[in-house]
Amino acid sequence: MNGVASELTRLATLAHLPALLAFLDAEAQAAGLDDATLFPLHLATEEACANIIRHGYVDTPGPLTLSLIVTPEVATVVLADEAPRFDPVGAPAPPLEGTVEARPIGGLGWHFIHALMDDVRHAARPEGGNQLTLVKHRPIDP
């Protein structure tokens, strides 16, 4: 994948989440990403990072690496961690029926990420941990 690539690693804590997102926004804008592509990419990345921080590492934070690759066709965020391996295929489907008030809090993150992105891929890293790839297609100029 040829394009502009950049990477930042921080400790996976909520205190470091704003720095990861600011890095994403700055690098995406420097690479010429338009708001229509960046906005959903930012939201999905924020949700994914929060899930890694809250559920991946549980009590002991570890590294979280955010990589951004921007090509003329797509913008891709790759999140790599060293948390226990997680298989999202086994994650329960969120309850979408009924009123918001009647539904339990939480459980919509994975659904939300898939709704925002054009492609979402998860892989167990050979050295341990997880790699989540979020892909958003860029608009084609007429």
Image: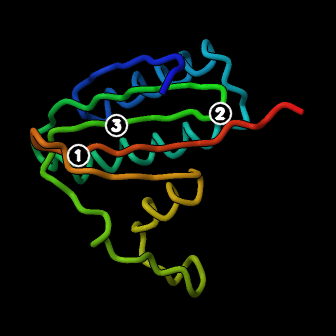
**Kind of residue at disc 3:** Leu
Identity of the residue furthest to the right in this view = 142
Residue 74, given in percent of the width and then of the height, sits at 60, 35
Q: CA distance from mark 1 to mark 3?
A: 8 Å
First of labels 1, 2 by sequence position: 2
Q: CA distance from mark 3 to mark 2?
A: 20 Å
**Image quadrant of residue 8?**
top left
Which residue is disc 3 drawn over? 79
First of labels 3, 2 by sequence position: 2
Q: CA distance from mark 1 to mark 2?
A: 25 Å
Residue 42 marker: none
**Image quadrant of residue 41?**
top right
Where disc 2 sits, the SS reads loop
**Kind of residue at disc 2:** Glu
Crowding near pointer 1: few (<14 within 10 Å), some, many (20+)? many
Q: Please give the name of the residue rendered at 27% of the width and 72% of the height, measured from the top-left corner.
A: 90
Q: Please give the name of the residue rendered at 56% of the width and 25% of the height, measured from the top-left corner.
A: 70
Where disc 3 sits, the SS reads strand
Which residue is disc 2 drawn over? 73
| Nearer the observer, 141 or 49 | 141
Q: Quadrant of the C terminus?
A: top right
CB within 8 Å, label 1 to label 3: yes
Residue 82, given in percent of the width and then of the height, sits at 15, 39
Residue 130 marker: 1
